[in-house]
Amino acid sequence: MPEFDIIRRYFQERTSPAPFVHVGIGDDAAVLAMNNDDELVVAVDTLVAGVHFPHSTEAFDIGYKALAVNLSDLAAMGATPAWMTLALTLPQADERWLSEFAEGLFSLAREFNVTLVGGDTTQGPLTISVQVGGVVSKGKALLRSGAHVDDVILVTGALGDAAYGLRLMQQHRKDIPDVCLERLNRPHPRVMAGQKLLGLATSCIDISDGFYSDLMHITTASQVGAIIELENLPLSRALSVDNMSYTDKYHLALAGGDDYELCFTVAEGQMQVAQTVLRELEIPCAVVGRITADQGIRLQSLETGDIKLDTLGYQHFS
Ligand code: ADP
Ligand code: MG
């Protein structure tokens, strides 16, 4: 049973609605009422050794990434991070490992003013759960559900680097481009970009599972479709210079995970404002497509016309 069916059938359908839940299960984070003009935005993500990172990953990078992936969900909501809790399951208490892990975690926490307020420590296979809380002005959070027909679709940064880095690592290659290792081990969450997009973007999601399936969350939640110009997808230089086939490149960009970029939509009239705002933050941003009334995502290529995702090696529900 796919992950999202499990969530819906066993959890989403059984939970009871409550007046303080403004956005519940189904977005990058929950949005909860507070007794002032703000709302509380909460997300949690778990990293399991051997599943979400190779066993060989440095402790510093594990600490850094455990917080980064969560801040990425707050970024997708446009929230300002405030606090975190840390649930840590360790095979053993290795002091050197712990010191480096904490160094990685707190280096990012300091950058975004995140205060550790609690957690849980247990023994078992290495697993790290970080929960984060942030704030956003009431009613302003960026949601997956706000995209309108004819909105323009944009993506920050570049796609596919982390997935490419992971692949090379699994092939035991020694010549992995630095940019790929950096993006795989220390993704820098687009927190400032998310905040600047408040009141500008009509929908937003962070790209954690691959551009295609994450854009699908926007189109499903917004009950629209999308058309994507394949050649406009921002591929990094690492993917462009390498002797890589067309299919392979676009497979990494569309279906590779761990990008932690933002995919968002804006009304056409706001496109230049959004681009200017991101340029001021020195964050690259590409226009990759448009929202359509036809459901589903159409991949268009200037070179070859329409492309079927399967031809790029995409496995549904893999
Ligand atoms: P993301 O990739 O943004 O972290 P996920 O794909 O992990 O989001 O989850 C999708 C949605 O389902 C989110 O709103 C998340 O909070 C919710 N969710 C995931 N697992 C559970 C669960 N076991 N119980 C309740 N809600 C869940
Ligand atoms: Mg997310």
Image (tube, rainbow, N blue to C red):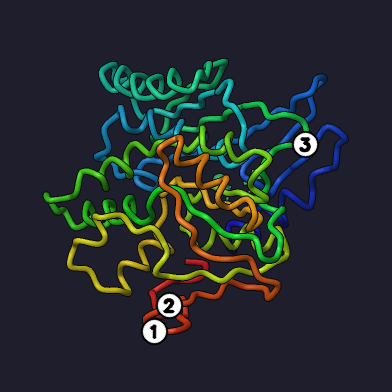
- Say the numbered circle drawn on residue 289: none
CA distance for labels 1 and 3:
43 Å
Task: Tell me what residue is drawn at x 24 percent, y 40 percent.
Answer: 56
The reply to whether dot 1 and dot 3 touch (C-beta < 8 Å) is no
Q: Dot 1 corresponds to which residue?
A: 304
Mark before the other along the chain sequence, 3 or 2:
3
Residue furthest toward the left? 174
- Inspect this view and state whether residue 44 appears: no
Residue drawn at the location 74% of the way across and 50% of the way down: 12
Please give the residue where the numbered disc 2 appears in the rendered image: 301
- Residue under label 3, please give it: 139
Three-letter code for the amino acid on which mark 2 is drawn: Ser
Q: Nearer the viewer, residue 47 or 222?
A: 222
* Residue 113 coordinates in the image, percent (x, y): 50, 18
The amino acid beneath tag 3 is Gly
Is residue 240 something one can see in this rendering?
yes
* Disc 1, SS: loop
Q: Do the residues labelled 3 and 2 touch (CB within 8 Å)?
A: no
Residues under labels 3 and 2: Cα distance?
A: 38 Å
Q: Are marks 2 and 1 in contact (CB under 8 Å)?
A: yes
- For label 2, the crowd category at 10 Å Cα-Cα, with few meaning under 14, some 14 to 19 and many 20 or more, is some
| Mark 1 Cα shell of 10 Å, populated few (<14), some (14-19), many (≥20) | few
